[in-house]
Image (spheres, rainbow, N blue to C red):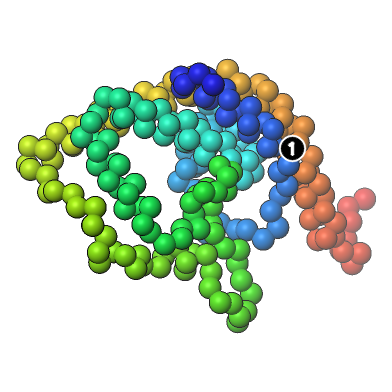
Amino acid sequence: MEGSVESRTSHEVDNWLRWLPRWHPGTHRTRARLCRQCFGSPVIAAAGLTEDVPHAVQHALAMRMKIVVDASVDEYTEQHLPLLSRELRLDEVRRARRVYRPTEGLDPEHRGLDLDPPTPKDSPYLFTFGELAGLPNPDDSDELDVPAPPLSADEKAAVLREVAIADAYAAEAGRRLCVELARHRLRMRAAVAEFVEPQVQALLADLESTLDSPHWRRES
């Protein structure tokens, strides 16, 4: 696959469209807060999925688009920003020493979602994934047998300049992604109408029948 933002965006849209027929409404997951990845997202707006689309469907697309931007920024950083690239490689070494993290290695449609479904009150359990993700790293105390010499003031300033350049590149990659995403809007909306809306309507019909009562007065 060509490594441009546009080609990667098209590729991930294709992956999302292949995933969409497998989507089914969740029955146990509720959100106590707005999703920062999706609420007000220019990606969701560019895709034309801001209204009447379940959050899980939006989230799956948003996370795939995040992969596109992250990959482009990583490549640019590796090629053009040596100091920042070095710091990121050291961070990866530290991450490799960490204990198991349940939030890592997930499929795009599951990243950033709550780890655990709501548990019944007084339900016994050994642990939750949320608790597991918060465990301290047992190797933190001797983490640096990969010693990193402290940065000088000039090096810190140079790293900060490269971070600003990487941020500007990420913003530009995001703009290009949204332009490309808008080109796929019609087929994404058509897929939502085919695979998502019938399931939502079935849920609403089931809810209406559940709430119906023979003792309620009916309008003639």
Label 1 packing within 10 angstroms: few (<14), some (14-19), many (20+): few
Q: Quadrant of residue 99?
A: bottom left
Answer left or right for 130 relative to 165: right
SS state under label 1: helix
* Residue 14 lies in quadrant: top right
Going by the picture, which residue comes out furthest to the left? 153
Depth check: give the residue in front, 205 or 110: 110
Can residue 171 be seen by looking at this rendering? no
Q: Nearer the viewer, residue 92 or 213?
A: 92
Residue 74 x, y percent position in the rendering: 36, 32
Give above or below for 175 relative to 133.
above
In front here: 167 or 15? 15
Residue 126 falls in which quadrant of the image?
bottom right
Left/right placement of residue 205 relative to residue 96 reads right
Horizontally, is 145 left or right of 12 in the view?
A: left
Residue 92 versus residue 5 in the image, above or below: below
Q: Residue at x 78, y 50 (%)?
A: 203
Picture quarter with the N terminus:
top right
- Establish if 163 lies above or below 98: above
Instruction: Name the residue at 63% across, 41% down.
Output: 57
Residue 177 position in % (x across, y down):
47, 24
Kindly identify the residue that appears in the image at 12 percent across and 44 percent down: 151
Residue 149: % across, % down:
13, 48
Residue furthest to the front in view is 145
Q: Is 33 rendered above or below residue 126?
A: above
Relative image position of residue 108 (x, y in whole percent): 55, 42
User: Which residue sits at x=62%, y=79%?
Assistant: 123
Which residue was labeled with disc 1?
21
Amino acid type at image mark 1: Pro
